[in-house]
Image (cartoon, rainbow, N blue to C red):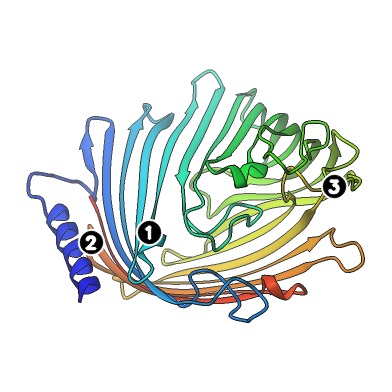
Amino acid sequence: MKKALLIGCFIAISLLILKSPQVSAQEGRIQIGKLKVVPSITMQGVHDDNIYLGNGTNNTDEIKESDWITHLQPALLLDYDLNGRGSLKLGYQGDWAYYGENDNNNWNNQNGLFNLDYKAPGGLILAFNDRYSDAEDPYGSLNEYGLGQPQTVRWSNDLKTKIGYEFSNRFRMFAYYNTFTQDYEELKDFTQDYYEHEYGIGAEIRLLPKTWGFTRYHYGSRNYFTHPAGSGSTKANDSDFDWHRVNAGLTWDIGAKLQGELNFGYQWRNYDNSRDAFGNRYEDENTWIAGTSLNYSATATTTLSCSITRGLIESASDTNEYNETTGFGLTLQQILYTKFTLGAGVNYSINDYNLPINNPREDDNYRFNLDLLYRIQTWLNAGVGYSYNRKDSNDMTNDYTGNQFTISIRGVY
């Protein structure tokens, strides 16, 4: 009864906000000169049959437990048009999660966005993309650290910049600078605190009216800046490393039927130290990499997407463990009868670890989702969805299967 009352109150508040009469909008957005103001709010209910991502067996401390999770997700985007030569965007996305039974797991995430894209009349090109996250969700980070553990408090900042010059309609060059910082709050998580800096150069040549071929070179480094007491990890033995990488592929102009990047390359990674905190030797690693993400507008109502990812993922500052992760995904978005949108996706990835030496850990990850969205009004839609998530590992303690059923209502001005 208490859970139903809470959900009912949230939905009522959401609808009252969305139906506020003093707002005038054009095509679902508030327009003030060249500035678009886009507020939105989402109310989502999720039944999760495995909130701790445990495997439900007696040989692990992780248990398999289900719960109903209510999400309240407000957002605001400010989008300023730079005279048709780009845009300046400032955005916010919040997510408050309330558990029906395990309310000590309640968490909230705050995310901010600052994005500048500009192309000057003389050929100068500028791009600045900064994403900040203050998170405590149980879904872990890129290396799956803290996966399934409630309220793993951390913040991160991901900044990507480039400056370039278009010498003609067929050729342009760029210089890049990227930086990433991840910082956990609890002492026990300090092996995950690091910052990265990356510098690069690249060139692009037009192959077709909206298609560019590119090649890029980057040099970067990662430095861990905290070392938990008692872990034995210090600057003299932590897993700091640097890398060189080259990438080549295709990219497309805005408005092309194909969007995104076809991106493959090769990376050379070198550790700063010879041994980790336990005396195990670091081994430099070289491998092919990929960061392909493509969207194809087959028709006005059908969009197909494909992703291919490949990279090396470090585990922590105090160990020489890492894994090679390779993934492939396909998604479909289909508009049905003008008011319905069907979405479906499948994804498979494999994590090949270098440890233990005699029988290295290997994880197979399977994901599937199916969603149906109904447009009630131009500014209001409702949806239902299902997602399946499974990890099969030769280390049984890492196995899990999760099913989530979702209902949602969302309004955007």
Labels 3 & 1 near each other (Cβ < 8 A): no
Within-10-Å neighbours for mark 1: few <14, some 14–19, many 20+: some
Q: Which residue is mark 3?
A: 278
Within-10-Å neighbours for mark 2: few <14, some 14–19, many 20+: many
- Residue type (three-letter) at the residue carrying disc 2: Leu
Q: Is residue 173 left or right of residue 40?
A: right
- Residue pictured at 16% horizontal, 60% vertical: 15
Image location (x, y in percent) of residue 343: 45, 71
Q: Which dot, 3 or 1, sits closer to the camera?
A: 3
- Residue type (three-letter) at the residue carrying disc 1: Asn
- Please report whichever mark, 2 or 3, sits nearer to the chain's N-terminal start: 3
Q: Is residue 208 visible?
A: no
- Please report whichever mark, 1 or 2, sits nearer to the chain's N-terminal start: 1
- Residue pictured at 53% horizontal, 60% vertical: 149
Image location (x, y in percent) of residue 134: 45, 42
Q: Of residues 406 and 380, which is closer to you in this image?
A: 406
Q: Secondary structure at mark 1?
A: loop
- Height in image: 246 above or below 355? above
Q: Secondary structure at mark 3?
A: loop
Q: Which residue is mark 2?
A: 380
